[in-house]
Amino acid sequence: MESKGYRVMAVAPVPFFEDRGTPIRLYEIVRSLQRLGTTTDIYTYHLGRDVPGMNIVRMPNIPWYKRTSAGANYHKLYLDLILSMKALPAHIGSNYDVIHAWLHEGVVISMPMRILKRRPIVFDAQGSLTGEMTAHGFVTSGSFKMRLWKRMEGFIDKRTDAIISSSTENAKKIQKMFGVEKEKIHVVCDGVDIERFKPARPKPELFRTIGLPRDKKIVVYTGILHTHQGIDIMLEALQKICEETKDVHFLVVGFPNVEHYRSMARRLDIGGSVTFTGKVDYKTIQDYLNLGDMAISAKILKSGEGNEKIYTYMASGLPTVVFDYHVNREALGNLGIYAKPENPHSLAKAILDNIFDGKKCTKISEQLRKKAIKDHSWDRVANKVTEVYRTVSE
């Protein structure tokens, strides 16, 4: 696509950069947009790492707030107010073409800018606001607080000029639940850096460093360690697997709650069959993926959000076991290995039925890599985002 040269203000009320979902999507999209001639200023929290080549504008430091993991909390109310006080004057004194708001909080921060300078808001909707709140235990499903936040979610969605949804499922929910016009919603699934993530021989020293066995089949997970990511179910599935064979080992790469899940593994008597690495730099994730024979994501996808990690699995050529949700099928198609949602028995069976079939896994691996290159590069994603910018800027 021909470079459009848009100037974009990204309002991102998250720690940036951090080695997890939304910050990774933001980083990769901005990096790919730069190659198309678009410049982006990222207005974000005080937390996170600086990234060479990106203009990151941080709000003032809040010394007592150090949380970098995902999830709703009441601190974000005043954090977002402080971020808005940083972003609003900058927007008034600049000439941005588009405001790219990340998460629902980003839209709220951006609303005054839209009014004052009539700049369009493109909302990058990672999922449902109330769905995330429920998943993280911030509200209870069906409660008065839940209904109140749901009304707020609909109000926010309708105050945008375009919505980028990371899955078709989420796009349908936004349209059906909140009455947003279909024409405003654009499905732009997650992508993957196909040069960074690609099959390669594992590094022998990494096996030694993390104490990973060389004589077992390795199932690798990367990402946040939390109930909504299905980590509890995943460990229960490993317990079922260990009852059948001792030749499967899980490699769990991620944070937080590492000690919690180590303790759970010991309670389930599978402590010797799972290795937890803790937090790993995004730039080195591929080294850990190369240790695996198969990848897994047991994420519970009830609110329609995307499942970014499976794109890195695909590009790495790893046969991937997931729950049978529409979001996962949208990404993997008939190349996924599917289990019944939230069912540890089915998850264990899906792994055992496939991991020892070398011929089948090799074939899937090759096809997944080709699909990632063809359909899911970040450059392809950036082209779609640029088209959304064009639509709202006309």
Image: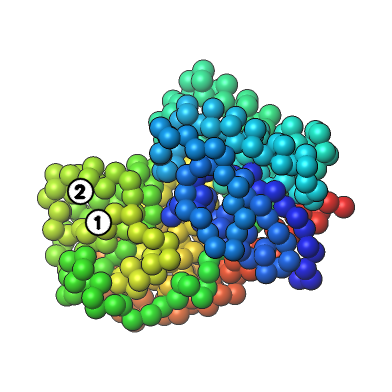
Q: Residue furthest top?
A: 144
Q: Is residue 174 above or below residue 299?
A: above
In the rendered structure, are the residues bearing label 1 and label 2 in contact, judged by CB atoms less than 8 Å apart?
yes
Residue at 33%, 54% (x, y): give it: 279
For mark 1, what is the residue?
276
Give coordinates of residue 364: x percent, y percent.
42, 75
Give coordinates of residue 366: x percent, y percent.
45, 80
Q: Which mark is residue 57?
A: none
Q: Is residue 180 above or below residue 197?
A: above
Give coordinates of residue 130: x percent, y percent.
53, 32
Within-10-Å neighbours for mark 1: few <14, some 14–19, many 20+: many
Q: Amino acid at mark 2?
A: Arg
Residue 134, picture quadrant = top left
Give coordinates of residue 121: x percent, y percent.
74, 43
Say whether residue 184 is visible.
no
Q: Which mark is residue 262?
A: 2
Say whether residue 231 is visible.
yes
Please identify the quadrant where the N terminus is shown: bottom right
Residue at 49%, 38% (x, y): give it: 61
Residue at 57%, 21% (x, y): give it: 148
